[in-house]
Amino acid sequence: MPYSVTYDEETDCIFVSVNGELNLSLFNSMAPEVAQLLKKHACKQVLNDLRHTTLEQSVLSIYSMPEQALKAGVCRTIKRALVVNGAFSEFRFLETVFINQGNIVKMFNSIDDAKGWLFDEEKS
């Protein structure tokens, strides 16, 4: 399987890992699984490990991802970290589209930095 979606009880976080190309079809397969775990555990954060992922470069496909996530049940108030490998340029448009549609999303190069941001508000 090109992706995995799991819930980590210790951190109260959904972990999504994608290997290969992230396209709208794959996104539409993952989103309901993420939504189900968010609802089941009343969880408010998702860490997306995209370090071994390439993003389909279709503007229309990327632009529709936030709407598809919302339709699947992943609300805009869910805090989402995107961990990418190297430069942010490949995923910058995806991040911007999500933010412009009212989502809480931020990119990182390290899992630790992403966790620090995700859980910062939870500790205060």
Image (tube, rainbow, N blue to C red):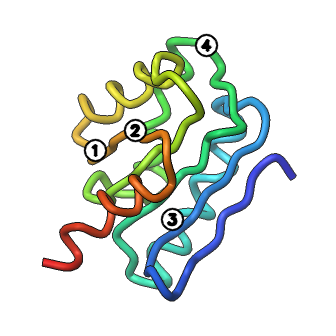
Is disc 4 surrounded by few (<14), some (14 to 19) or many (20+) residues within 10 Å?
some
**Nearer mark to the viewer, of 4 and 2:** 2
Q: Looking at the image, is 22 positioned above or below residue 50?
A: above
Residue that label 2 marks: 107
Where does the image place residue 79, in percent across and percent down from the top left?
A: 32, 57
Q: Position of 81 compared to 79: left or right?
A: right
The residue lying at 34 percent from left, 42 percent from top is: 106
Label 3 secondary element: helix
Query: Mark 2 or 3 closer to N-term?
Result: 3
Quadrant placement of the C terminus: bottom left
Q: Position of 30 compared to 10: left or right?
A: right
Residue that label 4 marks: 57
Residue that label 1 marks: 103
The residue lying at 46 percent from left, 73 percent from top is: 13
Q: How far apart are marks 3 and 1 (CA)?
A: 15 Å
Where does the image place residue 22, in percent across and percent down from the top left?
A: 68, 33
Label 4 secondary element: loop
Query: Mark 3 or 1 closer to N-term?
Result: 3
Q: How far apart are marks 4 and 3 (CA)?
A: 25 Å
Q: How far apart are marks 4 and 2 (CA)?
A: 18 Å
Circles 4 and 1 in contact, beta carbons < 8 Å? no
Q: Position of 34 compared to 29: left or right?
A: left
> Of all residues shown, which one is farthest toward the left?
124
Where does the image place residue 84, in percent across and percent down from the top left?
A: 55, 36
Label 1 secondary element: loop
**Nearer mark to the viewer, of 2 and 3:** 2
Residue 40 or 22: which is nearer the viewer?
Answer: 22
Where does the image place residue 81, in percent across and percent down from the top left?
A: 41, 50
Q: What amino acid is labelled 3 in the image?
A: Ala
The picture quadrant where one finds residue 123 is bottom left
Is disc 3 surrounded by few (<14), some (14 to 19) or many (20+) residues within 10 Å?
some
**Which labelled disc corresponds to residue 35?**
3
